[in-house]
């Protein structure tokens, strides 16, 4: 059976500004301050352009020794962040996620966090999809709350 491609989209509304949401989501050092208990450790492996979280940046999130490495591949200040998994351990192949922050008419921000991936082993895609989508639902909620408190 050939490996299949899967995708998900999570939408969330926040009363916080796109600037604050973007700042928290793109800064690898801050993840452990707002994404606990899912992300108890976070930091930088490499800064990007612009520093710290721009294109080429690699953030490390998770719990040692199983830290996920995520590389920024597109970066539009206060609007859009696109990243991929930058090596093992990764729950999926060819993972690509986009976080889009759109100011809304109520003065807050709409968050759209979407992703695509190829199943690592044939038949594992549905379970990986549930795992990733559930994690992103949790992260989007925690991100919105942290930005609203800031």
Image: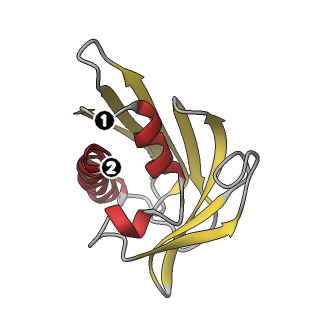
Q: Residue at x 53, y 50 (%)?
A: 26
Q: Quadrant of residue 39?
A: bottom left
The relative height of residue 50 versus residue 106 in the rendered view (above or below) is: below
Residue in the picture at 68% in, 46% down: 54
Q: Position of residue 79 (x, y in %)?
A: 51, 29
Q: Is residue 2 visible?
A: no
Total number of numbered discs in the rendering: 2
Q: In the image, residue 127 lies at what x, y percent?
A: 28, 59
Mark 2 neighbour density, 10 Å: few (under 14) some (14–19) many (20 or more):
few
Q: Residue furthest front?
A: 150
Residue position marked by numbered label 1 in the rendering? 16
Which numbered circle lies on residue 150?
A: 2
Q: Are marks 1 and 2 in contact (CB under 8 Å)?
A: yes
Mark number for residue 91? Answer: none
Q: Out of 83 and 143, give the one closest to the viewer.
A: 143
Q: Is residue 131 left or right of residue 23?
A: left
Q: Is residue 43 left or right of residue 109?
A: right
The residue positioned 29% from the left and 26% from the top of the image is 108
Does 103 sit above or below residue 113? above
């Amino acid at each position: 059976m050939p490996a299949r491609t899967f995708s998900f989209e999570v939408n969330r509304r926040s009363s916080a500004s796109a600037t604050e949401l973007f700042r928290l989501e793109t800064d690898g050092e801050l993840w452990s301050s707002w994404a606990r208990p899912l992300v108890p450790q976070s930091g930088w492996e490499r800064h990007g352009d612009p520093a710290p979280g721009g294109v080429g940046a690699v953030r490390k999130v998770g719990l040692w020794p199983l830290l996920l490495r995520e590389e920024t591949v597109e970066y539009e200040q206060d609007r859009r962040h696109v990243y991929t998994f930058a090596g093992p351990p990764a729950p999926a192949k060819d993972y690509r996620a986009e976080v889009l922050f759109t100011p809304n008419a109520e003065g807050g921000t709409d968050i759209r966090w979407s992703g695509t991936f190829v199943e690592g082993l044939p038949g594992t895609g549905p379970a990986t999809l549930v795992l990733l989508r559930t994690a992103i639902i949790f992260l989007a909620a925690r991100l919105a709350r942290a930005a609203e408190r800031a």
